[in-house]
Image (cartoon, grey):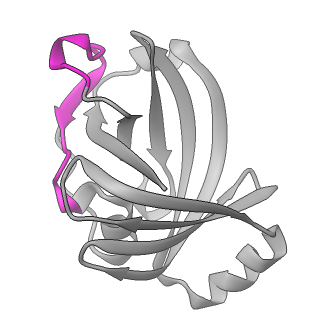
Amino acid sequence: MAKEIERKFLVSGVAWRTLAEADIRIRQFYLAAAPGRTVRVRISDGTSAKLTLKFGSKARERDEFEYVIPLAEAEEMLAFAIGRVIEKTRHHVRHGGYLYEVDVFGGALAGLVVAELETPDDVQDEMLPDWLGREVTGEQGFYNASLALGGIPEIAA
């Protein structure tokens, strides 16, 4: 089990794009979601898949269990998805010694760009890059499970 401190931000501007090291095409969906817990399947670049279980209701800290699963089984599980399948491209961007995951959403969520910072420690605000917009940590509408199961949040950086 890994504890993660996760912060989420809307992204303002495109300055981060010149710093992007990698991009991964992601399709993800949920098999179960309830307050304080989710079961998710993520398919990356159409070549690998992971099953992830998350527990906890704190805005910045949750318990996470993640397992590699066969791609064919992940594709079969798609039939049991609840809500919409999330399509996004994840870009890895480094700043100040930390890795930011910048997700550019497609499909029904096109136009939404969210950066996540997952660390074992809490990063001070003055160490954050200028291209981050409004912090949305704790705003349930911006969590992937809510994006899959609910409406589209108002996007305002």
Q: In this view, does 60 lie above or below 35?
A: above
Residue at image point 16% right, 55% down: 139
Please provide percent x and percent y for residue 46.
Answer: 77, 57
Q: Is residue 96 left or right of residue 131?
A: right
Above or below, 154 relative to 115: below
Closest to the observer, 59 or 132: 59
Q: Going by the image, does 24 lie left or right of 124? A: right
**Residue 111 shows in this picture:** no
Q: Which of 27 and 2 is in front in this view?
A: 2
4, above or below 93, in the image: below
Tell me which corner region of the image, top left, top right, bottom left or bottom right, holds residue 66.
bottom right
> Residue 127: within the magenta?
yes
Question: In the image, is residue 130 part of the stretch drawn in magenta?
Answer: yes
Numbered circles on residues, count: 0
- The residue drawn where x is 40% and y is 71% is 148
Q: Residue extending furthest bottom?
A: 80
Q: Residue at x 21, y 64 (%)?
A: 57
Name the residue nearer the viewer: 144 or 59. 59
Q: Residue at x 17, y 52 (%)?
A: 138
Magenta residues? 123-140
